[in-house]
Amino acid sequence: MKQYITALVIVLALSMSSCSKFLDKNPLDQISSETFWTSQKDVELALSGVYSRILTGTFDHNTMFWDVMGGDLNTNQGSAVIPLAQGQLEPNSGSLVSSVFQDAYRGISSANFFLDNVDRAPIADDVKDRYKAEVLFLRALFYFTLTEFYGGVPVYTSLPLIEDAKINKSSKADVVAQILKDLDAAIAILPNIPYNGHAVKGSALALKAKVLLHNEQWGPAAEAAKQVIDDGHFSLFHNYRSMFLATGQSGNPEIMFSAQYLNPDRSATGPDIQFAWHGTINPRVELVEAYECTDGLPITSSPLYNPANWKENRDPRLALTIKTFEENVINSSGQEVGFNYNAPSGTGYMPVKGLNWDALPIDYSTRSEQDWILLRYAELLLIYAEAKNEDSGPDQSIYDAINEIRARPGIGMPAIPTGLSKDQMRERIRQERRVELALEGKRYWDVKRWKTAETYIPTLVDPGGAQRKFDPSKHYVFPFPQSERDTNPNLEQNPNY
Amino acid sequence: MLATKACLPVGRTRWRPASMVRCLLLLLLTTFFYENTLAGSLPFKSITGTVTDQQSNPVSGASVKVRGKVAGTQTDAAGRFTIDADDNDVVEITSIGYLASEFVVGASLSYNVVLQEDLSELEQVVVVGYGTQKKVNLTGSVSQVGGVELTKRPAANVQNLLQGKVSGLQVTQGSGKPGGDGAEMLIRGTGSFGGSAAPLVLIDGVRGDMMTLNPDDIESVSVLKDAASAAIYGARAANGVILVTTKRGKARDLTVQYHGNVQAQQATRLPELLTNSADYMTYWNQANERSGLVPYFSQSTIDAFRNGNDPVKYPNFDWVDHVFRTGMAHNHHLNVSGGNEKTTYNLSLGYLDQDGIMSVYDFKRYNLLLSVDSRVNKWLKFGGMVQFSKRDIMEDNFGDNDYVMSAYSGPNYTPTMTLPDGTTGYVARYSSAIGEWTVRNPDALNASGFRQKNSYNMRPQLYADVKLTKDLTWYTKGAIDFTSAFNKRFEHAVNNYYFDDGSFAHNNSVWQEGVRDEMTQNYETTLYSTLNYLKTIGHHDINVLAGYNQETNYYRRLYGSRITFPVNTISELNAGAELAQSTAGHASEWAIQSFFGRVAYAFKERYLFEANIRRDGTSRIAPEHRWGSFPSVSAAWRASEESFMQDVTWMDNLKLRASWGKLGNQEVGLYPYQNVLQSTSYPFDALAPGARLNALRDRRLKWETTQAVNVGIDLSIKNGLFSLTADWFNKTTYDILAQIPIPASMGLDAPTINYGKMGNRGWEFEVGHRNRIGQVDYNVNFNLTTVKNKVLEIPNTVYSGNKIAQVGLPWNSYYLIEWDGIFQNQDEIDRSATHLYNPQPGDLKYRDANDDGEISPEDRVVVEGAYPKFYYGGSINLSWKGFDLTAFFQGVEGFKHYVGGSHMAWGYTPYTQGSPPTLDFIKNMWTPERPSNTTPAMYHSQYRPVTGTASTYWLLDASYVRLKNLAIGYTFKNGIPQKLGLNALRVYASGDNLFTITDYPGADPERACVTCRFSVYPQVSIYTIGVKASL
């Protein structure tokens, strides 16, 4: 018996050492990159992967915080955006200084990963070209966002190796040229149809017009915008409020591109929780005062203005954008509902736009699925108006564009006065952009490109007495994050940081 | 002789006159035959007795002798003996592993003897990797604690019982939460920052979770601290190894033992908060004014509270007192064991029911342990065991620390109120004008849901032990560890109202309404087999071990949630609406395969050498790099055995030890080298699945390696009168996983590579003293450990929060601006460096470390306190007659706690979401009339001049020394247990955490997380009475 056991020991010892497969264990719920890019399904997974990069703070409702820096909003104490808005804008500031950089480059790397590899997949050329065009549009959006914050940035059009990822920034003009190249390639291929969640030709044209406008290429900007107007796939929506809510967004003819959400699985800590509960956005009184009275006159000159009732006789867009801290609201079933804000308002005001009263009272189970609109037809009309005015001065098409927005059903503001000079028209357009696009994250870029930031921002005082600061010698662009300069010594810091 | 025995009283037999007559006749007869022996003396008495250990377990096979007589006897399996003796004879009892004992024969015919364990090193056998060894023959650094020593403290979990008992092992109990009072264990410092720093824990040779064990089931715990002792566990031994051995049956009659206790538990320390509402409102207004905010309360409201005429409408309320209560626990353990030379068995049943000290907290643990060992024939022994535990934990839905946070910042008025419609509702806060973050009402939290955790753990093991030749043994064990755990979170709306007007405030949702269920399974198999050759040739002792080990693990998780439920009483998923349901699932697996060997050689038990090697292959590493070898060598010299020391009789043992070895840490993630795409999604019109590249991976990634050197000395004098073990160690861990920083413009997470290098060096001491004065036996033990951590190589300096990781400094040292008192007046502010946030007199003043006239992040300096300077434990054990007393102290020195998120320190920072200030703060705060240089003026948690700068003001000294346990027991003697039908009986009373000496303000200084918030589930003081009995 014992001999058998001894033999067994030897046999077992030998057999144990030979099972090499024993240690081969692979991830069970993740896709291996070794076996990817082998079907159309894989390509579609990767395409969704690139789109998923816009569901981040830099492209969703969190962009509302940029308007804090733009001077139209405040946020509550303790927010990391406050020091930035007060001019403590440094390479080590963190917050937006690093998050915008990171979110945009994550998008770029996903786009490059797609473009580098898509040709390996066995897939029909027309489908492939269309997907590529969508990805080029997204890459343009990512780079454009970077130029608006940082000016010139390092440009990668394919995934670099770690050793090679240490290049200096390109000039802003070169980055813009790259953006326009991507957009033109996208415009040539994308279908000319209404927006359906995928970028379409109109989306790319609108982004192109915007990029050109922001880079003061007035003629081409007006031309691109004009093309969208003429194509006729987009128009103003009849309901200013519901356009920003999930109920009004499906098939909405005004939306040209948006970061899309869907309950229950693709809803972040949405705008309802952040703004209608945590109360992290407080509109400033300066913004409230910027809205005209219903006669089209500013509150300083309108006889209709009632200082005792800020809302009376005002541009209807005001009440659809801003409320007071105490005010209750009416939900879609006609009930009056109150708020249980988690933080007081430093300004006394709270936002309305894009917030869903049917979600009240809000708690941690609240899920928001309103899409965050990145491009809409009203902005396109204003891009057209501004570019055209700068290019060739006021003409009827500019009046038409602005008055169309003011005459939107449910808004019905009177037409702007006729006979404006180019400068007067410029002021009109800027005023219209401010109120029409309020709380949409557009203001910060606007006051920077108009160069009004350096005069306007320093006049603002925050609750608690701190003065806003804007140093024109450096604050028109963000510094690069210090960690980026540490890891990429070739990257030149922006001036005066 | 036989006749004598038969007629004298045995056990519980009583004298009867009739039998006396018969006996006298018999005695006469025997006298006739044995007259030589008995001539001239009184007749012998036959006395009986029982020998037990301190835990009332019978001691079988103990030798019983009458001093001066040759004849003797042995105790039977139940520890019983019978022996003939005269009055005033001295009866001596000796047994291996126990100190000798004696008693003088008196009038009684029955004696109970309790043997003290012999703690002297010479006899101690220590559990080591894949075997046991006499402690004197050890060449490595191993500390062992016996189950008896451990369970002197009647605590519920084994980890905490190890605290302060072993040098080199730092045990930090996280909290006093029932079922969640697990501890963080570190052996000889923090060995890694990339992988795990936790030691490998093996229960009966197989990986397991100590939290599943009942302390009464433990035979011993061995801690393998250096490379020599741990290298046999190779790639998982870098952080040390803890070997837990459970109790087995002994060859004796069936013995039934019961241990039960009842415990009352209370929070050790709680902050004393302001409970007067009028003061609370006044100070809040003051704080708001200081922040430039409008006051929340009108003077008339404050006055109404102040005059106290209407205690219903204008109440004062003490939330801390309301929330915390005394929690009761009871604990029962029943053990049945016995057997004969062939087969032994052990069956234990354990039950623990422990209430929390607040809210719905409750813990129930059920344990079963069954083992059978059977010797089939001369060369084959086999056996098996199964260990089963079920743990049910009930907790608050908000989370432990969040619940305590609520308790420290309750709504400052009554928990409930009468609403305008006459019904009763929960109070949210005073009025809607207070726009602070929602302060939760603890009572409303209790009403709005719970978390429930149930886990089942089953550990069957089978082994065979074959003696192949006289010297060669083959041992094989197969084991499974199966854990199934279920978590449920249930939450429903509970309306809360404003106190001033009863209007609706919020529905108290804290996370997500509805039900969230999670089920996990973990299935782990272990198979190991060893060949062991033991041979003594003359003065040469040879011990050779070769073995193979393999383990596989499969883990699975399923998750599902639904939000809308028809009623608040049903908490199963099916009852909820399918709308907005969500699911998730995950599975993972790993495997490890190992070969190992050991050669030990001793010459004359004087010169000891040992070498170990383990070769591990792990699934976590790429195939081309996955095998690695971990060797160790060690030697010891027992100087006391040298011939020149033979005259030094007072020296029991003097041994010098040294070891070197390499150990691995394979806790580097499950698939760290494999390139994978992350799953994602994007909703175009419907949700489309997506995949994206998120991170770069380094295929060459491998385990972290630790090289350790240990030098030690063991000394024992005069049979344990004084003993000392001292060790110096130096561990260097290299190839620590570190993320190499890459530019963010790559758009991907940096790859993890083997880069970092860190050292831990230090000293540990264990000192003992044992003696007997008169009838008092006592011993004193003390241990102390000091470890210095130092980062030797990292890719770049890392700043995380208030800490810095930099070459040359301890890992994650505190890096803070230095607090430098309080600004007394405007002039002082003007003269000082420019502070951020425009401070006022009464605000914190900081030190301008770089003298640039400005307080900025550049002024941060490295501050000690991230690690203890040293930690220690000590105990005093006394026994006198049947009484025994143990006092056990434990402490940590030089450890600091940063009040995490200083502006969110409920219970410490005034008006954090409305939480009241502490009485201490109010007493000491700065006012123009009563300047202070230690406490600022009343502020609000959002007030930046105080809370806006991470400074040493928030660094609290968490050093402490505490009487961890005081226990007094009495073991009944003189036949009392027998009268009750028992073999042995012991009762005891014990107190845990009876007092603490510390500078830490308000709460308990003992906390696992040093940068966590101030409000955590408190530690508890435990008052226990218990009984141990055996049949």
Image: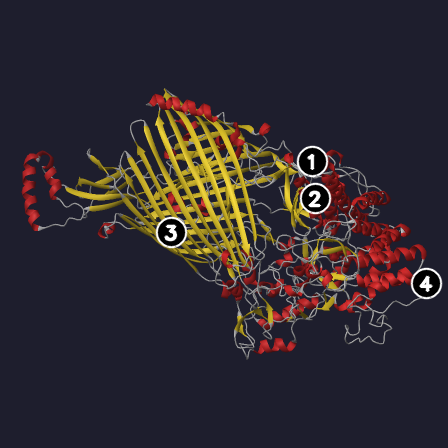
Horizontal side of B164 relative to A211 (left or right) equals left
Whether discs 4 and 2 lie on one chain: the answer is yes
The percent coordinates of residue A279 (x first, y second) are: 68, 63
Q: Chain of mark 2?
A: A
The percent coordinates of residue A473 (x first, y second) are: 86, 51
Q: Residues within 10 Å of mark 2 (few under 14, many from 20)?
A: many
Whether discs 4 and 1 lie on one chain: the answer is yes
The percent coordinates of residue B475 (x first, y second) are: 39, 29
Which residue carries the number 2 mark? A47
Which residue carries the number 4 mark? A421
Nearer the observer: mark 4 or 1; the answer is 1
Whether discs 2 and 3 lie on one chain: the answer is no
Residue B351, label in figure: 3
Residue B3, label in figure: none
Q: Residues within 10 Å of mark 3 (few under 14, many from 20)?
A: some
Which residue carries the number 1 mark? A122
Q: Are marks 2 and 1 in contact (CB under 8 Å)?
A: no
Residue nearest the viewer, comparing B69 with B113: B113
Q: Residues within 10 Å of mark 1 (few under 14, many from 20)?
A: few
Q: Residues within 10 Å of mark 4 (few under 14, many from 20)?
A: few
Amino acid at circle 2 = Leu
